[in-house]
Structures are given as structure tokens and as C-alpha cells.
Amino acid sequence: MQIDTIIHIEDWLFLVEGAGLTIVLCLQAMFFGILIGLVVGVARTAKTRLIELPATAYITVVRGTPLLMQLFIIYYCLPLFGINMPKFLSAALGLSFYTGAYVGEIIKAGLQSVDVGQREAARSLGMVSWQEFRYIVLPQALRVIIPPTFGFLIALVKDSSLVSIIGYIELTRASKLVVARTFKPFTLYLGAAVLYFVLCYGLSRFDVGYLRKRFSANLAEA
Amino acid sequence: MVWRCTGFDGYAVGQSLFWTGVVKSDPGIRIGARGEVIVLGYTIHFSEVFPYLPLLVKGLLLSIAITAASTLIGTLVGLFSAVANLSSYKIGRITSKVYVEAFRNTPLLVQMYLIYFGLGQFGIQIPPIPAAIAAMTINTGAYTAVIFQAGIQAVDIGQKEGGLVLGMTYPQAFRHVILPQAFRIIFAPLMNQAISLFLFSAVASTITVPELTHQAMFVDSVTWRTFEIFIVTTALYFACTFLATVLSDLYERTRPVK
């Protein structure tokens, strides 16, 4: 049998499709990660030890262990306990928990950056707890939170390449599959690297151009 | 021939919504006849992992070794790159910028594949460990370059001028006045970068470097105690990063930034 080792245009399209799946995966991980991060970040600032301690433990453990191991535990170990998930869900779940820990820490830092006098002023104006959080703390904290969160999103696009190891077909896995047929690893991995570069560099340009101006400049004025 | 990516289609989305067979036959946690712990029908046997602990520790030592080697060389690469970027030579600035942007915006995994598998396309074959160290070095070098640049710029310009006024040449002022102060400022970010690199050294298992993750997968294939082995491995990784964080904090506290 003759093996077709030429890289066709379809192969490059397959890589682009993989890049699309990387984006979908990252968006989902970011969405659920921010939800987890919000809960954990607020819990981190709680005065009750019973709430603060589990949140701190979660953040410390996830930030202190390799993402690859977290993905392995979710993908290989949960089925042992009868919890079966498709690859996409394992990948999304693993990345979400990972994102949640990092974003949680960013949110905690953001909330703590708001001067305590602001909270006291809100209270003395007669605001209740949720009003204080919604109208006083959150808008100021967001300016501190958004730039590093965006930075983490860029890192997440790169880190998401690890889900290829558990077999989910995104950009890295897609290039690996084409390499298996064409035996041209340098060309294809370079192609994958260029696609990652376009994604990450594009995101970082957007970051500098828009978000910094929108959120950090206001803070400098204040 | 058009290849389709499986995974993101109607079937996968449907599967995502309904986990199949969440609980098998044995719900909850119970203690078996011989005192073993059974969670959701899976009997946990940490004892089967213990004979392989020396192998895991051997893997861990290699993980630490490749991280240490890459961090050391990578820090030098980063320093040179930062100096080149801050220099008045256009060619140095451009080279440094291209290097930093190219390697900060692509995944370490793909960089490793490019060096280990990719160079094979041109007949260049590098053994796994040097390939892993090379990939990790150029990767961490790009991140370290940015850290160094920020640190050097954070040192007050008066310090440099002071050094020059005292009769030092620019390299002397840089070496004896600016760098020590910059290093103290960037110690924490450098440490974080080293810890992060250690965590991502797990990726080297994919190019058959026998480090901790690779050994864990080997032990898993021998014992089939997947859960126990990955928990022990994760604990080993965590112990190292936790220790490194504590030591780094301790150093920070004993030598505050002046």
C-alpha cells in the first residue's frame, strides 16, 4: 500500500479546525473557571475559617501540582469510581478547575486591593453588605482583576495544549495526527506553533490596546 | 481526504450533559472485610504502590535535575536577552524581541515536539533528556528575559549614574551596582518561574524522558493502580513546590527590598 506523505491543503485546514477547538475549549474553561474563581476568590477573603480554609487549600493544591497530573486524575481515575465522561468534558473540567484556582487568586488580590476606607464609607452612607460589594468594591476591584485575568487567558491557550496528551483532538493533537501520516514533524509542529502564536499574540495585542486603557488608566487617575 | 475532528459535535455535547453510569453497584465509602477502603466500588490499595516509591523518587530527582539545569541556563539566556533588548544596538533589540515573543506565545509542549521530533525531519536526532532541557531552557529564557528587563528598569537611574561618577565603566556599573539590586527585586518572580517550569517539566514525559510523570505511567502500566499512583505522584510534585514556596518566602522575609 502506498502511503500518502504529502501535506495537503486539507491537512492545514484540519490544523485550523483544531485551533478552533482550542478556542472553544479555552472559552469554556474560562467561563467555568471564572465562576469557580469568583466563588473561591470571595471565599478566600471570608473571615470565617471554615469557608476560607477549603478555598485556600483548593488554590494551593491546584497551583502547586502539574496540570498534566490534574488532567490524568480526571481522565484516568474518575472512571475507576464509575464516573465516565467523554474526552471533551474531561478536558474542559480539568482546565476549568485549573483556571478556577488561578483566577480565584487574582480575584482575591483584586478584592483585597480595595482600600478598607472605601468599605467603611459605603457602610456609613447606609449601604447594606451586597450594595457595598456591588457598587463600591466590585467596580474598583475589577480594574485590578481584569488585566491579569486576561493574561491568564493567554497562558491558558498555551496550557490547553496539554489536553492533547489525554487524547482530546485540539490543535496539538491535530498536528500530531497529520505527522503520523506525513512524517513531516517540523513542518507541521511549526504550523501549529504559528497558529498558537497568532492566537496568543493577537490576544496580547488586544490586551494592551484595549483593556489596559479601559481599566488601568482609570485606576491611575483615581 | 478531509479529516474531521471528533469531540465537538452533537454527540459529545449530549454526552456532556448526561454522565453515563455515575454510580456503579456500590455507592458510598465502606470498609471491606480485610480493612480495605472501598470508594464507589473501587478498592483502594496504596500498599501496592509503595514498592515502586524508589522508582518514583528517582523520577522526581530527574524532574528536579532537568528543571534546575534549564533554570540555570535559562536565567543566563534571559539575562543576555534582557541586556540585548535594553541595549542601543538595533539588531540586539530586534533579535531579543523576536525570541521573547516567539517563545512566550507558543506552548512548551509544541516547542518540545519541534526539538525532539521536528529536527528529525532534517536528520538531527537529539536524545530525550538534552532535548527536554533545550526546550525548557529556551522557553524559560524568554519568560526570564521579561522579568530581568522589568527588574533592571526598576533600579533607579541615579544608581547607574552614581556608579559611572565613581569611575566605573558601564559594564562594571551594571555588574556591581544595577544587577545586585535588580536581582533582589526579581527574586520572587524568578522563583515563581522556576516553580512553574518544574510543574510543566511533566510535559517532558511525552518525549520519553524518564522523569516523575513518565515513571508514574510506567508503574501504572505494571500495577494498574491508576488512582493510587497518580495521587502519590501528585503529592510528590506538591511537596516539592510547597517546600520551594516556603523557602522562597522565608528568603524574601529575611532580606526585604530596600
Image (tube, coloured by chain):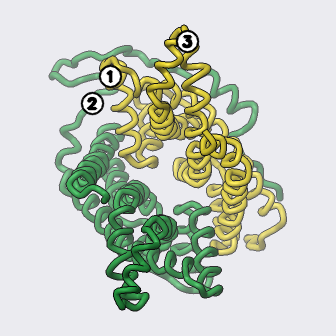
Badge 1 crowding class, 10 Å Cα cut-off, few under 14, some 14 to 19, many 20 or more, is: some
Q: CA distance from mark 2 to mark 3?
A: 57 Å
Coordinates of residue B86 in the picture (x, y in percent): 55, 77
What chain does mark 3 sit on?
A
Vertical arrangement, residue B222 with respect to residue B231, above or below: below
Specify whether disc 1 shares its chain with disc 3.
no
Residue drawn at x 61%, y 62% is: B105
Q: B21 or A35: which is nearer to us?
A: A35
Q: Quadrant of residue B161?
A: bottom left
Point out residue B143 in the picture as x, y percentages from the top left corner. Answer: 50, 65
Task: List the residue tagged with mark 1.
Answer: B39
Q: Quadrant of the C terminus of chain A?
A: top right
In the image, the chain rendered in green is: B
Disc assigned to residue B94: none
Q: Three-letter amino acid code at disc 1?
A: Val
Residue B44: give its label: 2
| Image depth: mark 1 or mark 3 in front | 3
Q: Residue furthest front?
A: B165
SS at mark 3 in the image: loop
Q: Which residue is mark 3?
A: A125
